[in-house]
Amino acid sequence: MQNTLAYQLLRTFAKQDIREARKWLASPYHNQREDLPLLFEQLAAAAPEGQPLPRKQAWQAVYPNRPYDDQQLRLLLSYLYRCLEDFLLQRETEQAPWLQQHLLLAAYRKRGLDSHFQKAYRKLHKHQRAETQRPPEYHLARYWLEQERYQEESTLGRTREHNLQELEDQLTCAFLSMKLRQGCFLLAHEAVYKASYRIALEEALLGLATQEPYRDIPAISVYCHCYRMLRFPEQDQYFTTFQSRLFQSIGLFPQAELRDLFLLAINFCIRQINQTAEGYLREALELYQKGLETEVLLENGDLSRFTYNNAIGIALRLQEFDWAERFLHHYRPYLEAEQEEAAFSLNAARLAFARRQYGQVLAHLQRADYRDLINNMVAKTLQMKAYYELDEFDLLESHLRSMRAFLRRKRHISYHQQNYLNIIRYTQKLLALNPMDREMAKALEEEIRNVEPLTEKGWLVEKVGNI
């Protein structure tokens, strides 16, 4: 049963979803079969916890006096799945009141109930005007509302001036903002995956977005400046303007969309930093701080371990050790439970290393099991560096052999594998270096500077220079 669509759908249901779906199936308007609620109860008891449910067991619970019929069970599962789909559609519609009102307007218009239509129109128009959030979908909803009004006026043959300008303006705002938003995601994807996308009407979109009355529309302004930042990364003023507009727009977009915008800006900063534009470190930290302060970077009350790791990494590079320590402890409870100990211990070790507290580095690293492969290698690299700083060279050589053996068993991580093999290789060369041979040290430093990939290049160059 685990492979059936109904089971997989119920696997995602919370307790409240189960209770409401049970009521849905009990209503004769939604379901007139007596067997569907029985099958639902069997699946609802097993699926949310991922427990197995044998097909014959489910059949016996529904039809205790009938021989097992696999075809009939498949048909019943299909009926149940369609009922649950209708339930989900209703739930989603309940969370989009503007869509409900739009459909209600259409129903009144089709039935010729003009007074009902006008009352519903005024209510929805007032609600939309009072809405504080202004994402692209706001303008699309405004367009749909005015489209219904236009059709109603046309049907009744009223000769007064139609709302054609409002229709045109809202359609343009919706199209322009959604097109720019889509362009931002395409450019961001291009930057990471070296893909190439065709973005139609680019010059026209950017030109129109800077003209009245569109340039002051929040959804257009924010995505226009984001697009310019991504399209022209070498021009710092576009990032500065986008960051300013983004901070001004908090409250004007849903949290999920704001989070996407913050991540577009943060990831842009990280790419610039990786290309030696170290000045973006401060901007990246400001984005993290603002995103945390406003809870934009939280998702359902949780902080992802990637955000946790990256924010601390940026703070450490800026030597903002006190902020990093406060962040480390304050946001620990916001991590998912199964990741909390590993993420906290790893980042506590990173902070201790930055403060040259090498004994504490080793103590923190012993407190967690790093099941994630990359975090495991980050921890092993920190341990390697701590051994070196503590002059524990015998332990270090043993640790390097262990790291190499571990990597040989993980051949599916080609880029990361080569990076960590290079770290091991040049650390071993560092250990073998004769401190009296300056020519050899200079040659090794040059070799380290030129090799790629090598994420510990700075540390290795520093250690060679100190010999």
Image (cartoon, rainbow, N blue to C red):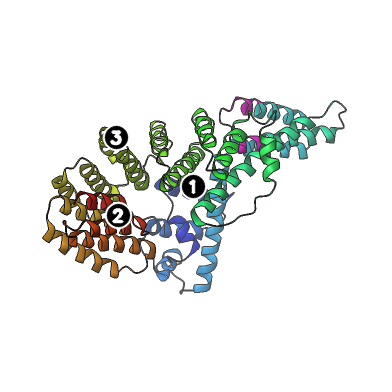
Rendered location of residue 413, percent (x, y): 37, 64
Q: Check the picture and name the quadrant holding the N terminus.
A: bottom left
- First in residue order: circle 3 vs circle 1: 1
Residue depicted at 11% across the width and 61% down the height: 394
In this rendered view, identify the residue nearer to me: 253 or 80: 253
Please provide the residue range marked out in magenta: 126-140
Under tag 1, what secondary structure? helix
User: What amino acid is at disc 3?
Assistant: Glu
In this rendered view, identify the residue nearer to me: 311 or 30: 311
User: What amino acid is at disc 1?
Assistant: Lys
Residue depicted at 49% across the width and 60% down the height: 6
User: What amino acid is at disc 2?
Assistant: Asn
Tell me where residue 48 sits by quadrant: bottom left
**On screen, 224 above or below 459?**
above
Under tag 3, what secondary structure? loop
| Residue beneath disc 3 | 320
**On screen, 132 above or below 328?**
above
Tell me how many marks there are.
3
| Residue beneath disc 1 | 23
In this rendered view, identify the residue nearer to me: 457 or 58: 457
Rendered location of residue 399, percent (x, y): 18, 62
Residue 250 lies left or right of residue 100; in this view the side is left
Rendered location of residue 344, percent (x, y): 25, 45
- First in residue order: circle 3 vs circle 2: 3
| Residue beneath disc 2 | 375
Task: Quote the CA–CA distance across marks 3 and 1.
Answer: 54 Å
